[in-house]
Image (tube, coloured by chain):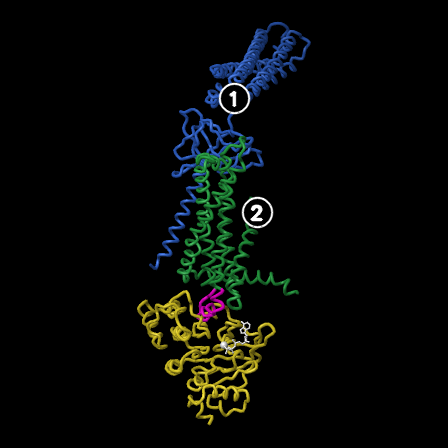
Chain colours: A yellow, B blue, C green
Amino acid sequence: MIEIQNLSKGFGSLQVLEGVSLQIHDGETIAIIGRSGSGKSVLMKHLVGLLTPDEGRVLVDGTDIDTIPYEALRRLRRQFGVLFQGGALFDSMTTFENVAFPLRYFSSLDEKGLQDRVQECLDLVRLSGVGAKNPTELSGGMRKRVALARAIAIEPEYILYDEPTSGLDPETSNTINDLIRHLAEALNVTSVVVTHDMHSVLSIADRVAFLHERDLEWVGPVAGIHKCSNPHLNAFVKANEYQVGDTTPALSGPSA
Amino acid sequence: MEYSNEIKVGIAIVIAVVAAVFGVRFLQDLPLFGDTYAVRAEFEEASGLTAGNPVRMKGVNVGSVGSIRLDQETQTVRARLRIEEGISIPEGSHAKVAGFSGIGGVRISILPGPRENPPLPPDATLSAPPEGSVFDRLTDQAPELANKADSVLTSTNATMAALSEQLQNPESDLRQALASANNIAGDLESVTEAEKETLRALLQNLRSVSGDLDTFMGENGDSLDVAVRRLNQSLDRLNRGLASFEETSATLDTVATKLNEGDGTAGRLLNDPTLYLRLDSAAARTNTLLKDFQRDPGHYLNDMTLVKVF
Amino acid sequence: MLDTLLSPFRALGRYATLMGRAFASIDKVGTYWNNLFIQMVRVGIDSIPIVALAAAFTGAVFTVQTAYQLETPFIPKTIIGSIVAPSIMLELGAVIAGFILAGRVGARIAAELGTMRVSEQIDALEVMGLNSVGFLVLPRVLAGVLMFPVLYVVSCVVGIGTGIGVGHFGGFLSASEFLEGARQFFKLLDPTIGLIKSFAFGFIITSVACYKGYYTGGGAVGVGDSTTQAAVLSCVFILVADLLIALLLL
Ligand SMILES: Nc1ncnc2c1ncn2[C@@H]1O[C@H](COP(=O)(O)OP(=O)(O)OP(=O)(O)O)[C@@H](O)[C@H]1O
Ligand SMILES: [Mg+2]
């Protein structure tokens, strides 16, 4: 379980988060939505100690990750898989090596097992046959999927996805959504998905947290998203609906 | 393939280390292969000598100066030399600083001792060459020695003269005279003992520098001549001193004989047998000492004439 | 105002902390063994040609100019060797290699780490549970410290070698005259100090570059800034360290 308590964070004069509190339960998939620049990625980075809160705490299974020693933090981080918004692939290595990287350091697989596992992960994100390529030779969407393959390679307990479907065609998006759901259900992974994509939200999330004006304005089950009275969230959902149009039955259904 | 980086790095490091070691040894004038052993050297004056300066023996490079420092206590310069393995320096060799620092040619020059001497063991110390200072020392010391012997002998002489005079004179205080004679005997003993050592050391020194004398003959022929002449003079004086010593002891003998025979005005002496015995023993002791002194210096002087060979 | 005054101290503190973290993870250098050798090749082996080139020209020019300046009948020609060889070993060998590597290695490391920082690759390493400082900084700094002396030796050998060659074939002084002069004034202290300098410069270049790269902020411009600053700061610190070593050890 991850517990965010009263977290505040600012950069210089810019206050990004203020008094954010949230509990993420084991095995659930929570979607964090919000406007671009609202601080979703910043919030996500706090969950693995990449950013330190100005105020408040982040507890992972009861441990305050900002006060434990660095070595303990490193051990704790090995339970996490993180998909960065920009992919953050190591451009000095091939795609294969990128996915194999965490396995080399944190699994006991032999070379054969490692190759199989990498292949499996690349298959899961529908990217077979690009193993020998350098990340710079891949398209944006492909890079994102390689990064996803890398994040799930060591089968972490927690996976944080920063916009897993942005920049992907609808079909591939659906594959990724299926994958996320599959991981959550089959492996009981706790997932935090940062996204703008309401289709994604509706198809994978158990709960939704809406970040607006430095705080989580609304947190609730995904079913309640259309019944809530929060004007900002309504506007956010409406805008998304308008943008996606009638092509998304899951969205238009409940709202009609 | 996995190890190709490690191999590259390894090769580069090995080459660099080899290049550095060989380069340094090359610039130090050391043999590129082979080892060196350490020898120490002491000087009064380093004349700008620094670590790395060459060490030469008979003009051939045989090593280099490893380190150099000033011993604060003794105010001498102590250097550590690295001598090529295979170059043996005979015992009795000396080291001196040669060349001028102004044009960078300072070096250590080893003056080898006699060829037949055993080689110096590692870490042995080479002293500065005697440079003629041994002769100075010798000529300085010899007259001193002679003077000492002289003065003792003179005073013995005088005392003996006084003694014999007093023995003739019935009014004199014989006890006092005998006591003073006794004192002189003691003095003589200590002098002989002390000078024996000095002489021995002197002669040993002489023997050990005999190898150097060869070199000096060439370089310092003139000064050597002078030194030898001075030395000879000193030895003459010593001889003369000893001769007078002999004379004195003869006098003492005579006195003793006279006393023995009960001649002259020695009636009171004869009345006191202990006094007589004491005088007798004092005379006897003086005699043995003198004989010893006579015999030993004679032997030493024979050795000393070695000097004349050069 | 106070911020501007304190910022150098803050930078120094961050730099020292980063180095502390790097060397605190030295026990895990085995984990990053491959990285170390990759960096040793990039920092060291790959720099050999350019260092050799610079050293060759330095040695040649230095010999020719010394010969020109000492063109007096009273001064023996061997003195040229006595000036060129120690100067290269004591100073030029290390400093020339240092300047070239500040540009070549320093800029490269800063750009590399800077790009990794702004593209979140460092964050990615961290969240995988790797010690990014141990993984990225330590191998680079160690590679600098270990390989710079090798480059120094290359620099000295090539510099003195070309000095001898140019002196000989340029008709200034024969190779044996050069060597005689070089030997006459040879002190073991010269290459020792040169070697100490090379260790120091290797550390300065790589550590400053790592610091600048690791703490890059703000995208491509940030990477550009870090790269420039790494090269410039390395050069400045090389000069400062050079002076300090000379003052302390000579
Ligand atoms: N390292 C940083 N330094 C300064 N400001 C930052 C930093 N990281 C984020 N910010 C600022 O914090 C705010 C939130 O950024 P964040 O990346 O969390 O947005 P986001 O919600 O993820 O947006 P998007 O959906 O576009 O990814 C932005 O205004 C951004 O400028
Ligand atoms: Mg974001």
Callout 1: 10 Å neighbours few (<14), some, many (20+)? some
Residue hosting label 1: B202
Q: Quadrant of residue A57?
A: bottom right
Residue A177, can we see it? no
Overall secondary structure of the magenta stretch?
A: helix
Given the current orientation, which residue lies at the most extreme bottom position? A256
Q: Mark 2 or mark 1, which is nearer to you?
A: 2
Could you say whether the residue bearing mark 2 is in a helix, strand or loop?
helix
In this view of the protein, which residue sits in the foreground, C63 or A75? C63
**Amino acid at the residue labelled 1:** Leu
Q: Position of residue C95 (x, y in %)?
A: 51, 49
Chain letter belonging to callout 2? C
Q: Position of residue B192 (x, y in %)?
A: 55, 19
* Residue B169 in the image: above or below residue B69: above
Q: Position of residue B128 (x, y in %)?
A: 51, 28
Residue hosting label 2: C248
What segment carries the magenta color? C114-132
Report the Cα–Cα distance between label 2 and label 1. 50 Å
Could you say whether the residue bearing mark 1 is in a helix, strand or loop?
helix
Given the current orientation, which residue lies at the most extreme right position? B171
